[in-house]
């Protein structure tokens, strides 16, 4: 099994940055992989790709300097199993609000005896081909595959210590927009009460040796790093493409 270089960086307490891919474009995935990002999050929750395309994106990203990660559509055994069978080096699971949900999520990500993930001949093991690079996947996946739980509701923040007491969680990732909305403060991602909840999550992460992560944005990166977040995810391929061309159009219109 290929070494998870992103996990190595995280284990060395390094700060990491990645971006989202929302479109069904293998070309976008390849281009983003050469930008210097540490990882690319393939969004199978809100993105336009199906699981077949997501698997091909994983393979394409593997050929770049970036690590392929996948967000699944929910905390369901079948979704997580199929998501990990793409060969992604980690899986993000949305809307985990209780200790019980965290226990379920972790168990779905791990092979027995740690969890209940089923063995199968997916892309993660080259569809059952006996290639050397894949032959030890089953024995090493429990150690190498990252488990990322999303903290994106005030209930999750209230239960954060119970959630993070569950073993084998690597990253607790805050979704600022869903969190603020659940608090009745839609989009107010820097409201004092929302910031207090960020801090609660960071403190719990420190207590339980879990990496704190957050969705970031232009002019927010410094703030989030200074707060103590170490896993930052910002930008989306569609928005990056639009903004790049739009800036050229605006410049043209200024002089035409």
Image (cartoon, helix red, strand yellow):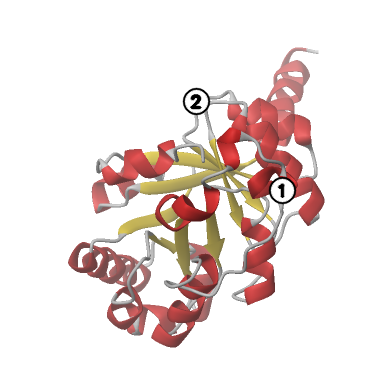
Whether residue 128 is visible, yes or no, is yes
Please give left or right for residue 70 compared with residue 196 in the image: right
Nearer the observer, 126 or 55: 126
Q: Residue 236: give x, y in percent of width and height.
A: 63, 43
Q: Residues within 10 Å of mark 1 (few under 14, many from 20)?
A: few
- The circle drawn on residue 181 is none
Q: Residues within 10 Å of mark 2 (few under 14, many from 20)?
A: few
Most extreme residue toward the top, as rendered?
A: 255
Kind of element beneath mark 1: helix
Nearer the observer, 76 or 197: 76
Most extreme residue toward the front, as rendered?
A: 130
Q: Residue 98: give x, y in percent of width and height.
A: 43, 85
Q: Residue at x 46, y 61 (%)?
A: 148
Classify residue 35 by image quadrant: top right
Q: Residue at x 74, y 26 (%)?
A: 245
Marks 1 and 2: which is nearer the front?
1
């Amino acid at each position: 099994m290929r070494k998870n270089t992103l996990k190595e960086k995280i284990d060395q307490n390094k700060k990491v940055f990645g971006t989202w891919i929302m479109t069904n474009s293998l070309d976008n995935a390849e281009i983003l992989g050469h930008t210097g990002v540490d990882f690319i999050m393939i969004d199978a929750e809100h993105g336009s790709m199906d699981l077949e395309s997501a698997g091909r994106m994983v393979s394409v990203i593997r050929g770049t300097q970036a690590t392929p990660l996948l967000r699944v559509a929910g905390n369901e055994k079948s979704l997580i199993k199929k998501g990990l069978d793409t060969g992604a080096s980690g899986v993000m699971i949305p809307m985990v609000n209780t200790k019980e949900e965290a226990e379920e999520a972790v168990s779905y990500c791990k092979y027995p005896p740690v969890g209940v993930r089923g063995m199968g001949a997916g892309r993660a093991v080259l569809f059952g081909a006996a290639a050397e690079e894949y032959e030890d996947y089953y024995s090493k996946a429990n150690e190498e595959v990252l488990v990322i739980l999303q903290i994106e509701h005030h209930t999750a923040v209230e239960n954060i210590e119970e959630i993070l007491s569950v073993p084998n969680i690597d990253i607790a990732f805050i979704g600022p927009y869903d969190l603020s909305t659940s608090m009745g403060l839609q989009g107010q991602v820097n409201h004092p009460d929302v910031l207090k909840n960020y801090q609660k999550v960071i403190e719990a992460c420190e207590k339980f040796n879990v990496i704190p992560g957050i969705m970031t944005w232009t002019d927010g990166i410094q703030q989030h790093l200074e707060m103590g977040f170490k896993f930052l995810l910002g930008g989306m391929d569609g928005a990056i493409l639009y903004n790049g061309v739009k800036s050229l159009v605006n410049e043209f219109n200024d002089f035409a």
